[in-house]
Image: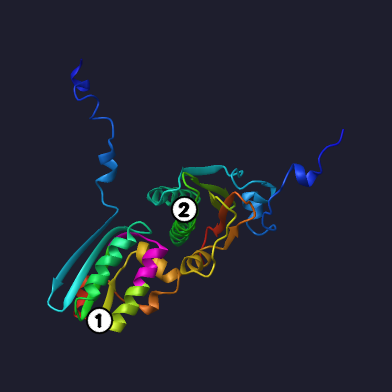
Amino acid sequence: MSESAGNGGREVVATEDDFSTEEPMGVEVERSGPTSVIRLSGEIDMLTTPALRAKVTEELGAGLSVLVLDMLAVEFLGSSGLALLVEALDESRNRGVSLRLVADSRPVSRPLQATGLTDLFEIHSTVEEALAA
Amino acid sequence: MQTPEPQQRERVPEVPAPGAATEVDGLSDTKSLGEVPSPVEVRVHADPALIPSVRAVAADLAARADFDLDAVSDLRMAVDEACSALVPLAAPGGQLRCGFTVVDGRIAVVARVPVDAPTTLRQDTFGWRVLDTLTDAAEVLDGDPEWLGIRLLKDRTTA
């Protein structure tokens, strides 16, 4: 047995872990006082939207005055994600929460623009700007 | 010796009237949605977890065909939506098949899944509205009793 085969070929064969360790979507919530920032990353589609919906619903029900959705690291936004944004906007209005999006790249801005939703939202290009608004 | 009546021997499902997409995807000559003459076809289990791979192929083909960046984004999203609408309707164990034809700066897509019973797709949903908005043509293919499909056409430029 040569040394290169000593690991049973593990070094060269991709295991399932190699493909599944990367989360398709990340959601991080940072709350400070009456403000919450949800930082999203990765792909928001049919598969990942339910987890995101749960987080957004939780934050919208937490008695906040400002909810910021930081979408700068989002790589894909599908129609289920768009639908969720619209739902969140309705819900935020019902609850008197100011919902602010942070988005400045094509994966988010194009879907909003192409579907005519851009003008519905308050959109900022940085989190700082959204918090200061 | 008598041959059966043609209509009994071979039931030709109704495929849509020749539209803008026909000259690109050649679908009007197709008798079954299961097999379509697309130069590129992706076949995966009808599983939501595999849709990202299908939409990635769509975006790759569009980028290589010099689609502008917005058009690439639109096509990726439209294919995602088409697949997301079809996969939940697929017969158990069925395949999602997605064919792509790139001709003259346009891409035609024929996505379909096998169905247990003839069925169609609601077009009064938010998802369908998005699909229709993002493409130059979007059509439900429900003429084949064994398959349900969506056909899309997208131009290289969004201007």
* Location of residue A21 in the rendering, given as x and y in whole percent from the top left corner: 24, 46
The image's colour scheme reads rainbow
Q: Do tag 1 and tag 2 residues touch (Cβ < 8 Å)? A: no
Check disc 1 and give the amino acid type. Answer: Val
Question: Does the magenta-highlighted stretch encompass residue A4?
Answer: no
Residue with the mark numbered 1: A97
For residue B124, side relative to residue A91 (left or right): right
The answer to whether residue B10 is above or below residue A40 is: above
**In this view, the mark in front (1 or 2):** 2
Q: Is residue A132 visible?
A: yes
Q: Nearer the viewer, residue B28 or B140?
A: B140
For residue B102, side relative to residue A73 (left or right): right
Q: CA distance from mark 1 to mark 2?
A: 36 Å
The answer to whether residue B41 is above or below residue A23 is: above
At a point 56% along the width and 63% down the height, the residue shown is: B136
Check disc 2 and give the amino acid type. Answer: Val
Q: Which residues are magenta?
A: A73-85
Q: Secondary structure at mark 1?
A: loop
* Location of residue B73 in the rendering, given as x and y in whole percent from the top left corner: 43, 59
Instruction: Write down the chain letter for disc 1.
Output: A
* Callouts 1 and 2 on one subunit: no
Q: Nearer the viewer, residue B108 or A78?
A: A78
Residue with the mark numbered 2: B87
At a point 38% along the width and 68% down the height, the residue shown is: A82
At a point 61% along the width and 45% down the height, the residue shown is: B36
* Location of residue A130 in the rendering, given as x and y in whole percent from the top left corner: 23, 76
* Location of residue A132 in the rendering, given as x and y in whole percent from the top left corner: 19, 79
Give the farthest residue toward the left: A33
Q: Quadrant of the C terminus of chain A?
A: bottom left
At a point 48% along the width and 67% down the height, the residue shown is: B130
Q: Is residue A126 visible?
A: no
